Amino acid sequence: MIEAFTLPSARFLQLTRSRLAACTRTKCIAVRYLSTKLQDTRQRRVSLFEEEKQRQSSQKIEKIKVELVQPVPLGETEKPLILLMNKHKSTPYDCAKHVSKMLLDSAALARVTPSSGDDCKHVDMHEPLTEDCDLKLLGFHDGDSSIAHTVNKAFWRSCSFVLGAVLETAFKDSNRVALHSWPGADYASGSFVYDVKIDGLDNWTPSNTELDILSRHAVMRVLGTRALFEPLEVSQEIAANMFADNQFKSKQLDSIAEKSGKIRVYRLGDHVDITGGPLISHSQQIGHFSIVKVTRLEEGGGLYRFQGVALPAQQRVSSYTWDVLKKAAKRPNRMVTPGQPRLVHQHEPEQSKMELNR
């Protein structure tokens, strides 16, 4: 059962009863299930995703040879593991299952080099392999700076994706959320973002307590499960059907499909959204996660930019260091979302009157 709690200065947020005491001392005044309409919308997207995924994978099974470079201790020579996998079905994630659970859990991206050429590309762990190739699985602690940069961008991008999943399900029915978009991943900015439209919240300034509850909602609803970031390329027609209820996503499809005629979507549990990717392998690769700032993007409207900060689960930090990172992430993120020149106002919200319960 999913519950909604309205704070003295809030309108929202679904949390499980068992975790409420650890989150906030505010009084519960409303309990409800997730709205049927929202459930239906999200389930329809998932169903369309699965139907198209099954259609694309229903081809005749052919075998491909994958030479998987296994991790070895420093100074030792790499010895590839030769695997026979299924063309258009098997993924780097499937290949990792032949090595170890540790590698399966830690690999975030894959580097694929076709056997017929030297051009390598970085792909999702759940991207089906299409030809004979050399495969290297990439983690968060790779010593190669270019690989580390690529993995970090994928991590930041994945956190924006999670933020969208959280926001779409966090508010009451009277405050319907329409996911807009987010700028390209830039971890140097100190924060990841998602821009959303919230009905009925034209001049909302969230308190620290509300931001804290949103962050805990993310941990309990999304990050507490081992959900996979599953990619899929679909036609513009299928994407239009998936996002028919979202005016912003619908308008963005033409420009996204302009080059290839395809739209890249991802599924994370019961959430489906659009992004070019790549994303990391699964939700439990995200450790610390906090939503730290909300900024109104247009005068007298309900369009807001949510900012957050996160760390990979493998990266351990002290509470002091984490607080420093959260403080830095509160700096206004000025990155421009493509195709939105009209978003010219960046109003700094006033300090909330309700302080975080400590």
Image (cartoon, rainbow, N blue to C red):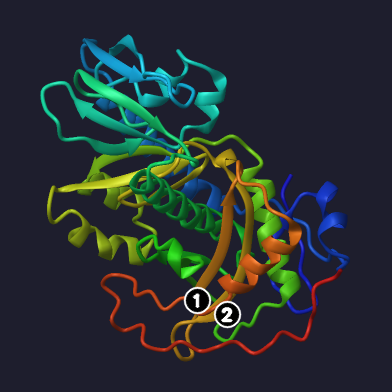
Q: Vertically, is 172 above or below 129?
A: below
Kind of residue indicated by mark 1: Tyr
Kind of residue indicated by mark 2: Leu
Residue at figure coordinates x 29%, y 61% from the top left: 250
Q: Nearer the viewer, residue 89 or 42?
A: 89
Residue at figure coordinates x 53%, y 75% from the top left: 199
- Across and down, in percent, residue 26 comes to 86, 68
Whether pointer 2 and pointer 1 mark residues with C-beta atoms closer than 8 Å, the reply is yes
Q: Secondary structure at mark 2?
A: loop
Q: Vertically, is 230 above or below 115?
A: below
Q: Secondary structure at mark 1?
A: strand
Q: Residues within 10 Å of mark 1 (few under 14, many from 20)?
A: many
- Across and down, in percent, residue 311 comes to 58, 52
Circle on res. 304:
1
Q: Quadrant of residue 174?
A: bottom right
**Quadrant of the image containing the N terminus:** top right
How far apart are the two marked residues, 2 and 1, measured between alpha carbons? 9 Å
Residue under label 2: 201
Q: Residues within 10 Å of mark 2 (few under 14, many from 20)?
A: some
Residue at figure coordinates x 73%, y 55% from the top left: 318
Q: Nearer the viewer, residue 172 or 25?
A: 25
Q: How many marks do you count on the picture?
A: 2
Q: Vertically, is 302 above or below 251?
A: below
